[in-house]
Amino acid sequence: MGLVHQKIRIANAARDDLEEIDARALVDTGAIDLCLPKLVVLQLKLKTIEQRMVTYADGRKELVDYVGPVRVEVFGRNAFTGAMVMGDQVLLGAIPMESMDVLVDPRRQILIPNPDHPNIPGAMAMGFRTSHA
């Protein structure tokens, strides 16, 4: 499978007064989190929450800033998350993709809304029971 890129909108979820940013994100189902380059973090005035240890595919480890809160939007679906500050491009990982209920279509090499929930994002709440009054 080749690389999948997707146009997304990202914003500082705590600052409605700041402009949102349109970005071309690399979609990476093997990555967990959203990753943002330092320039995007500065533009959105995101605050550092903590530092996280990142392990790269080659085994290297690096301490990076974890910032937030970030709102990510694609196909009219939103996720609220934090982001690791690293790299030179926006990387969309599995957690925000799950939150927005989007999938990679490997045949067409594109990101798509989950066909099981085409109109609104779906979510799973395992182990919860609803009470019937």
Image (cartoon, rainbow, N blue to C red):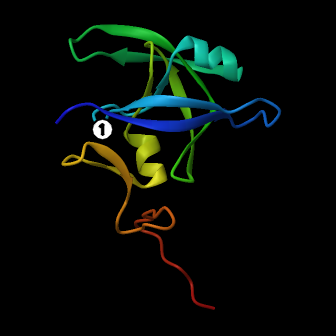
Quadrant where the image shows the N terminus: top left
Q: Can residue 123 be seen in this view?
A: yes
Rendered residue at 43%/13% (across/down): 87
Residue at the limit of the structure toward the bottom, as seen here: 133
**Figure disc tally:** 1
Rendered residue at 21%/46% (across/down): 106
Rendered residue at 60%/34% (across/down): 10
Quadrant where the image shows the C terminus: bottom right
| Three-letter code for the amino acid on which mark 1 is drawn | Thr
Instruction: Judge the density around disc 1: few (<14), some (14-19), many (≥20) Cα neighbours within 10 Å.
Output: some
**20 shown above or below 85:** below
3 on left or right of 26: left
**SS for tag 1?**
loop
From the viewer's side, name the closer residue of 14 and 61. 14
**67 shown above or below 6:** above
**115 shown above or below 11:** below
Q: Is residue 46 visible?
A: no
* Residue 17 % position (x, y): 83, 33
Which residue position holds label 1? 29
Q: What is the quadrant of residue 42 in the picture?
A: top right
* Residue 41 % position (x, y): 62, 18
* Residue 86 % position (x, y): 46, 14
* Residue 38 % position (x, y): 56, 12
**10 shown above or below 39:** below
51 on left or right of 54: right
From the viewer's side, name the closer residue of 100 and 7. 7
Rendered residue at 68%/23% (across/down): 44
Residue at the limit of the structure toward the right, as seen here: 17
